[in-house]
Image: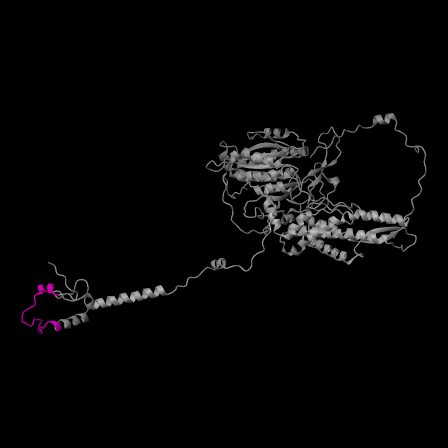
Amino acid sequence: MSTTLPPEIPTPTGTPAAVTAIPPDRLDDDAQAADAQTPHDSMGDAADGTDPDWDELDDWDDPPWWASDWAAVLVTSIVAHLIVVLTLALVRLHQPVEEQVALMAAKSENVPDPVNLIDTLQYSDDPEESIGADSLSVSEAATATAIEFAEIAEIPSPVDTPPVDFGQVIASEVFSQPVAPMQRLTNQKGKVGEGTQGAAGAIDRITFEILKSMEERPTLVAWLFDQSGSLHRQRQQIIGRFDRIYEELGIVQENDERFKERKGVDVPLLTSIVGFGQTVQLYNEKPSDDLGAIKQIINSINVDSSGVERVFTAVEEAANEFKRFRRNTGDGPARNVIFIVVTDERGDDAERLERAIGTCRRYAIPVHVIGVPAPFGREHTYVKYVDPDPRFDQSARWAEVDQGPETLLPERVQVGFTGDFQQEPTVDSGFGPYALTRLCYETGGIYFTVHPNRNMNRAVYRGEVDPYASDLRYFFDPDVMSRYRPDYLSPKDYLEFVRQSPLRQALVQAARMKPAQGIDAPRTRFVKRNDAGLVADLTRAQQDAAKLEPTLLMMAQTLMPGMEHRDDETSPRWQAGFDLAMGRVLAQKVRTETYNAMLAKAKRGMAFSDAKNNTWVLKPADEITVGSRWQREAETAKTLLQSVVDNHPKTPWALLASQELSTPIGWQWTEQFTAPDPPRPNRPGNNNPNPRPPRDDQARMLQKAPTRPIPKL
């Protein structure tokens, strides 16, 4: 039977315990305790003289565990550790608190002013599509999450392109500032200010876009042609350029190994033709790579004389027709699809714009437009029309065409009274019509503003304008105009953007008012034959001026709230637009009211300094002598107009402001002598009219070609 020994008792062999060596001091203490309880001699024998029986040690009573020293040490250690643990538990550890959490919990002292939204707005319930820039599938992808964006692009990178045979292409590669929609940003937007002198020049640039697309995958190009008669010559120019396009694409295909690998597997480039007018027509349901067949289709496009251009309907229906090429086949879409729209108007179905944008974005189809420049702040311009049929009269006539404006809502006041009485020239806005340009912008395409007589160095007069081109007097540098790009927002976001600024609200409201046109050329010469006749003439002139005063006064009152917020506006376009509007309205208000006041002064009676004179002539003057209030308003107008000239040079706003400043605002009376009209002789009969030409001369006269009415363009 094995025996368990206490740790303090030595083994019979005198060796220490197996596991724990007992310290010598503890052995001495235990021995002394044994001596006190059991008598024995110095040799270790019992008092009775007998040796102790080691087997009987098993019967000894073990001392209690708390009586040993090792137990005391163990208890002391446990107590010490408990004290340490409890101390650590009671000590409050410092944990840094994020400042953001504290700030979010605290009540802000600076509460922003609430934005008052228009209560009467009604928005469409149709969802607007948004896709990621890198997405190629048909499903909606992640949208960018940036919450801030710069109002003005800060990194322009102009690209100079060499001139081409068919017209100078001015390609301004400016980073597009993200503006639409306001709650979310996309990082792929189109270009909106590409100026070119001809459609052929735009085709050269589009060829480059097609090549870039073909590098990625086979491509389908759909050409959407306006079927109006005014596009006949432009279509012929594009047909003549098709050979160059396919020749360049063919050369690239032959020299590029990537295209060689695809050859025989899939045609790298297919083309389809769509015509639109009052209806939309797909001319080849099966896209083709036969250049001859494509040119023949374009030549056979019928002219639509209805004058209706359903361009956005055509874009939407074409996108639905060719979306099968954009479906994901596991390795991406089968083809890239590119739309190229050729038109010279703004389109008559702008209500389909949002649907066209949504469909093209859903299937990642960029839309390029070869279009016309929009007139600055106007809906209409005049096009030089020459009958395309040589059997009819080839004389140039001018037809009104809808080509503007460049913004969603008018942002320019309409005032028609100027001191020099000249008709305000129609100028280039620097951008295309709003709806078509936004279609390009939202789908990642390019809008080409085509005008064959574009000249940024001088005025272009009517006699220089080519047939089917619009009458635009001045053009502007696209690089300069890039800072003044319109806000290509959805109607909902645009109205919200305007409502955020009293200055923008004032400008839009004034621009939507009835044009202030009461006097085309006010009467400035008054002959005094007698007092009653002079007063009657002055009164009639006052009545004409009075028609203009209320509209100008209402415009000035509408614009006035924006004056306090001029320094808060950061957009150069809105700054220039407001200062020009307020400056022109004040200038023409003062000019009109002081005109009326000067007539009233003359009615009260004025004496000629030279007794022989009999005519009063009213001339523009810088000095205003009829009221200090008008003098203060005139100074404000000059300050605003001069700020436009200084801060926004080489823009349409600066051009109109300088024109307004060139004419004095006030008036002054001058006197002249007018000789009385000589009596008309009483000539009886026909007064010996010229004889009729002989009959043989009439026979030899050239027969003039017949003239037919101008169709609706």
The answer to whether residue 170 shows anywhere in this view is no
What residue do we see at 62% from left, 42% from top? 437
Q: Is residue 668 above or below residue 303?
A: below
Q: Is residue 695 above or below residue 268?
A: above
Please provide percent x and percent y for residue 192. 61, 44
Is 206 positioned to the left or the right of 12 in the image?
A: right
Q: Quadrant of the N terminus?
A: bottom left
Q: How many marks?
A: 0
What residue do we see at 9% from left, 71% from top? 44
The quadrant holding residue 698 is top right
Q: Residue furthest left?
A: 49
The answer to whether residue 549 shows anywhere in this view is yes
Q: Nearer the viewer, residue 217 or 400?
A: 400
Question: Is 49 inside the magenta-drawn segment?
Answer: yes
Q: Is residue 432 above or below residue 562?
A: above
What residue range appears in magenta? 36-60
Q: Nearer the viewer, residue 353 or 79?
A: 79
Please provide percent x and percent y for residue 636. 72, 56
Q: Nearer the viewer, residue 672 or 478?
A: 672
Q: Is residue 292 above or below residue 418?
A: above
Report the magenta stretch's main SS: loop
Q: Residue furthest front?
A: 119
